Amino acid sequence: MASPTHPTHPNAKTVPVARLGIDFDVLADDTIIGPSIERGSWEDHETELFLAHLRPGDRVLDLGANVGWFAVQAILAGAEVHAFEPVPFIADLAERNMRRAEAKGPGRGHLHRVAASHAPGRAEIVLAPKNHGDNRVLDAGAPPPKDLGQAQRIPIELARVDDLVKGPVRVMKIDTQGSEWLALQGAKALLAASPEVAMLLEFWPYALRGAKPEQLLDFLVGEGFTVGKATAAPYPMEPARLLRQALARDPVKGGLDLWATRKLPFHVHGPKGRLRAMWRSLRED
């Protein structure tokens, strides 16, 4: 394994993250995740929700780990993390960041260098040239997404979560740029073994593979989840309302990050946060 203080990828660099108390490897030419982490944080609302129900000793699933921001948070909080990242040079950075977190915190991490899907196999992934968090798995024989044009494609391995990780888990994060439905179909046994679970999930109708957007929302509700948007003041939302808001956004620029809980409190920001959530629920479409 490469030294954690010397990134080996030509576009990698190490930056200090004071709030975590560790250095962090990012991609220097990234336009979104790397610069944000270099400024000290990434997806603050989602990170706060991700940690809200996490206790030392819990198990965490991170699908689409990228450079490991969420996996590192969970390790530092004392959890056992199973992170999935199929792009080799990004997985290298996630590995080093997770090892740094293990050296500082009480948790531990396992990195699976595959993409979570409904069945094992091989596929291609399109590498976004600027936003290195927007790499997308292709269906067999499918052309790349129009917005990625002539972007580079590389082969990757696919695996079912259920073949690699056994439940229960306490927290799941699924941000796979359109492969969320397929990832969930390969994690049904783990879901069944996790009665009390919180989930962060990207809902992006434009890129979703394997199902219609409403099927994904109906699946979550059918599994007993209370679902809303992952914001500073989330509130429970019906699938039709979530779908309407997601479709009203620019389709190519992305959808919504969802917050979902099953047999765990949905509201985690205290009385003031709950009041703010109620106000937002009345104000928004």
Image (tube, helix red, strand yellow):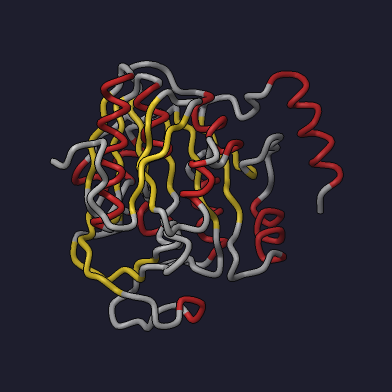
Give whichever of 266, 225 is nearer the camera. Answer: 266
Hey, which quadrant is residue 230 in on the image? top right
Give whichever of 54, 77 is nearer the camera. Answer: 77
- Residue 224 place in picture, x, y as percent: 52, 38
Query: Which of the image's four quarters has the C terminus?
Result: bottom right
- Residue 229 place in picture, x, y as percent: 64, 44
- Residue at the spot 69% in from the left edge and 64% down from the top edge: 249
Q: Is residue 197 left or right of residue 230?
A: left
- Residue at the spot 45% in from the left edge and 23% down from the top edge: 54
Hey, which quadrant is residue 210 in on the image? bottom left
- Residue 279 place in picture, x, y as percent: 84, 36
Name, please, the residue furthest toward the left: 1
200 in relation to 175, above or below: above
- Residue at the spot 35% in from the left edge and 54% down from the top edge: 183
- Residue at the spot 34% in from the left edge and 72% down from the top edge: 138
Please state the total of marks drawn on the protein image: 0
Query: Which of the image's four quarters has the N terminus?
Result: top left
- Residue 246 place in picture, x, y as percent: 66, 60
167 in relation to 208, above or below: above
